Image (tube, rainbow, N blue to C red):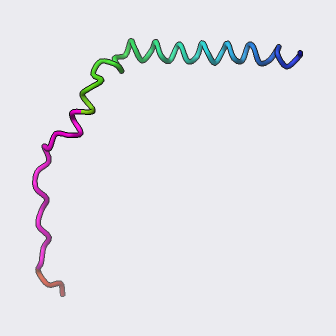
Amino acid sequence: MSGLLILIPVALFLGALGLGAFLWSLRSGQFEDLDGAAHRILSDDDGPLDEPDNTPRK
């Protein structure tokens, strides 16, 4: 029974901490562009790779 006196406030604190982190992420714009990262990984905007230098080394 005395364990509940510790576990209940800890659980309430962790729940409030999680809610605070979620509200912070909403206010800071973390959920503004959900599809952007999915489309950005498919876009091929990289240039061609440089050819290796085939000159003999001394």
Q: Position of residue 5 (x, y in %)?
A: 82, 13
- What are the residue bounds of the magenta stretch? 39-54
Q: Nearer the viewer, residue 1 or 26?
A: 1
Q: Nearer the viewer, residue 35 or 29?
A: 35
Q: Residue at x 11, y 51 (%)?
A: 47
- Asked if residue 44 lies in the magenta stretch, the reply is yes
Q: Residue at x 26, y 26 (%)?
A: 35
How many numbered marks appear?
Answer: 0
- Is 46 on the left-hand or right-hand side of 5? left
Q: Residue at x 50, y 18 (%)?
A: 21
The answer to which image quadrant residue 3 occupies is top right
- Is 57 on the left-hand or right-hand side of 31? left
Instruction: Say which quadrant the C terminus sits in.
Output: bottom left
- Asked if residue 55 lies in the magenta stretch, the reply is no
51 over 13 or under it: above or below: below
30 over 45 or under it: above or below: above
Prevalent SS, magenta region: loop
Q: Nearer the viewer, residue 33 or 27?
A: 33
Q: Going by the picture, which residue comes out furthest to the bottom?
A: 58
10 over 47 or under it: above or below: above
Q: Position of residue 43 (x, y in %)?
A: 16, 39
- Is 45 on the left-hand or right-hand side of 20? left
Q: Position of residue 26 (x, y in %)?
A: 39, 14
Instruction: Say which quadrant the N terminus sits in.
Output: top right
- Is 1 on the left-hand or right-hand side of 44? right
